[in-house]
Amino acid sequence: MQRIAWKYYPRQQDHNTEQNREKSPASVQLQLMMSSSFNIFRVGISFVIMCIFYKSAVDSLSELSPQKYFSTLQPGKASLAYFCQADSPRTSIFLEELNEAVTPLQDYGISVAKVNCVKEETSRYCGKEKDLMKAYLFRGNILLREFPTDVLFDVNAIVAHVLFALLFNEVKYITTLEDLQNIENALKGKANIAFAYVRAIGTPEHRAVMEAAFVYGTTYQFVLTTETALLESIGNEDIENAHLYFFHCKQVLDLTLQCRRTLMEQPLTTLNIHQFIKTMEAPLLTEVTEDPQQVSTIHLQLGLPLVFIVSQQATYEADRRTAEWVAWRLLGKAGVLLLLRDSLEVDIPQHANVVFRRAEEGVPVEFLVLDDIDSLISHVESNVHVEEIQEDEDEDTKSPNMDVQDDEVAETVYRDRKRPLPLELTVELTEETFNTTVVASDSIVLFYAGWQAVSMAFLQSYIDLAIKLKGTSTMLLTRVNCADWSDLCTKQNVTEFPVVKMYKEGKNPLSYAGMLGTEDLLKFIQLSRISCPVNITSVQEAEEYLSGELYKDLISYSSVSVLGLFSPNMTTAKEDFTEAGNYLKGYVITGIYSEEDVLILSDKYAATLPALLLSRHKEGKIESIPLANSHAQDIIQIITNALLETFPEITVENLPIYLRLQKPLLILFSDGSINPQYKKAILMLVKEKHLDSLTPCWLNLKNTPVGRGILQSYFDTMPPLPLLVVVNLHSGGQVFAFPSDQPITEQNLLLWLKKLEAGLENHITILPAQEWKPPLPAYDFLSMMDAAASQHPTRKDPECTKETDVQENDKKQHEDKSAIIKEPIETLRIKHWNRSNWFKEGEKSFRHDNKEL
């Protein structure tokens, strides 16, 4: 499972917000009854309804007593009280709509509840009849906004109004053309504008715009109006429908020039707005020299075609101007690229000046001869229209059972959404409880985001880990939902989801960087129990360490133990080894011996000091590796390579590790366990150094069924097994097969490999020179917010032998000091957004490439 990178950008504080307000004209400020320091990510808003008790209301609405409700309020979070009178069913329809809004609002971190009144209650929210017809939006115990229930007429209106109230900085509401011009002038050369017209507040189109602003509000300035005169003043007379314009103001440096405008022609839905903005973010024009059939852009992923303007050196400048003009005309409808014929290896017909590629997979490109731009635009628009009609027809005839996520992780999470998890086995931390908890006990902390599929999938593995460790571990398993506590996650240098960190008193947090699975995380936790490296003090203890007796309970988690041998005066070498051991803590057992009698061990194992002793417990072997002039990174690489098996079984999990060696793979495919004679022959060739240029391995189709698909991509039909092949992935892509009529012996293998080296063997196939991509495009969360100015933080080795960076006192927030490159808090900003609404529908429309191994 792959992590998804995410940069944190906490909002600016009050004084920065006020400065931004002063820079904008006062006439365009949207005055809302909310605090200017509102943090949109840490909404934590509880939406509390003063409601009339209605017995048929669905159970998903939280029901509390007034005392219980107010006692649960927390800073940064909020609530609603509709102290429900049991004898008044007038709000039953409203409660039904409110119940429908529970899930979408919770996806934004906004909780929904109703509070049941008793007749004796005389509070402001229970006492008067008119107060029972309002909904109240709180943050903590502060009232932010009150809404008459008649304006919250359905789920769209509820979501739209609440987000509109929260996004008072991101969305400017205007009524006149002068307001729009003022905003446009203020943002020229600085930022682009998303300008929306909706017929009324609370409509589905208004909700879609608010959801878009929730995602993109820190990247673009959203402007909203309901005034038909304003829409007509910019040249659009279609006042019956909602519209969205993208104002390209960032590239306008001359204040006398008007920002170029692009109209979104599709209906205003969440998915359509997302796709439209993604096309606005893409480069206007791209120059390529590749085969048009191999080019991939965001447009293809969004189901839009590509238009290649064919150019040559003699007419390059004129062709580029033409291509730019076409790109502006087709912006949001197709991707436009300039194809340089002179640099292209693929033949393009001499008469063709345009290449047209549809978004569907497997459809050949079209070579066109078009005399003018209008005919080209007409050709593209007519084809896009056909594609949209076809998609609509497919949607109408599609079975309801097919409405599932395309992404496998998201689909799994969606299907398991009703599966209860014993979350009580882990402790949920908040900003208030984090510091005291991790100080009081050694803790494992999972940082995750409740809206993200990978996080929720890994949460299942984390709970499975808690079940395994229940009653046996001194480590406290905890979790932090960064969707609720962004400031806390920022302080802990959490820049991707999910992340697991280990906190021990007096030491820097140790980050887990392994596979996102129960067994791998369990191995990390168990191996992290001991020092890194262990300080061995006697020859006898060293022998027990090498034999596995010293830490026999950990041998099942690490089949290799590493012992560094050093003379007492080898200070620099010992420091380098200690640094390497720190870095590898949780992944391998390391020890260090530097006593006066170290020569006893070096003589016994023929090791020249400084040296490493690698004890392979499964094989019962101990080998020595010299460390002369080896720095920490060299030692890390030596140990990492030593952990690799000589003839491993390839699985989905470990394949990337062996691919990093950048060597051709010698793979023995087997339908079950391999013949010991085959293994013996290959290991003998390894021992004799005949396979140094290859990575020998084997693949069990019963354990890794995907191997059948791999073989079928190499051969027309499934070949008989066992089968030995060489796959040259990194240079040429050739696949060679060992003759099936020959037995796999040491002599036959050596002869065959020599023929390969001499170029006397023919390949059975050549793998295409294409990137190996996931089945679906990765969700580019970073492009949905302001890009970080600095590079991605890199990991710093946690100090395991010195107690540094400890808390000054229990009251001070425990912060993660483990990153080398730190980004200043004031430059960071994070934004929580509704993944389920955006991508449950959005993933279905993405075009993607399914690439076989």
Image (cartoon, rainbow, N blue to C red):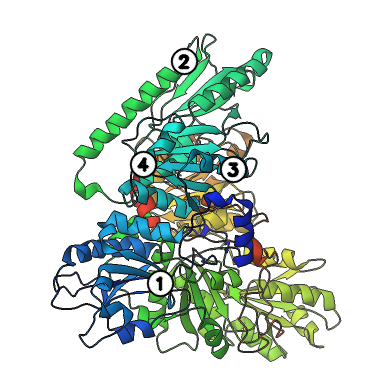
Q: Residue at x 34, y 35 (%)?
A: 239
Of residues 88 and 37, the one drawn nearer to the viewer in this rendering: 88
Of residues 760 and 785, the one drawn nearer to the viewer in this rendering: 785
CA–CA distance in space, label 1 to label 4:
30 Å
Mark 1 neighbour density, 10 Å: few (under 14) some (14–19) many (20 or more) = many
**For discs 3 and 2, the disc positioned in front in the rendered view:** 2
CA–CA distance in space, label 4 to label 2:
27 Å
Q: Which residue is mark 1?
A: 138
Upstream in the sequence, badge 3 or badge 2? Answer: 2
Query: Under tag 3, what secondary structure?
Result: loop
Q: What amino acid type should be assigned to the residue bearing mark 1?
A: Phe
Q: Which residue is mark 2?
A: 374
Query: Under tag 2, what secondary structure?
Result: helix
CA–CA distance in space, label 3 to label 2:
45 Å
Upstream in the sequence, badge 4 or badge 3? Answer: 4
Q: Residue at x 41, y 89 (%)?
A: 471
Q: Does the rendering let one see residue 835?
A: yes
Q: Is residue 836 above or below residue 710?
A: below
Badge number at residue 201: none
Q: Are marks 1 and 4 in contact (CB under 8 Å)?
A: no
Q: Which residue is mark 3?
A: 730
Badge number at residue 268: 4
Q: Are marks 3 and 2 in contact (CB under 8 Å)?
A: no
**For discs 4 and 2, the disc positioned in front in the rendered view:** 4
Mark 4 neighbour density, 10 Å: few (under 14) some (14–19) many (20 or more) = many
Q: What amino acid type should be assigned to the residue bearing mark 2?
A: Asp
User: How far from the left and from the top, in percent, is residue 181?
Assistant: 55, 39
Upstream in the sequence, badge 3 or badge 1? Answer: 1
Q: Does the rendering let one see residue 714?
A: no
Q: What amino acid type should be assigned to the residue bearing mark 3?
A: His
CA–CA distance in space, label 1 to label 2:
55 Å
Upstream in the sequence, badge 1 or badge 2? Answer: 1
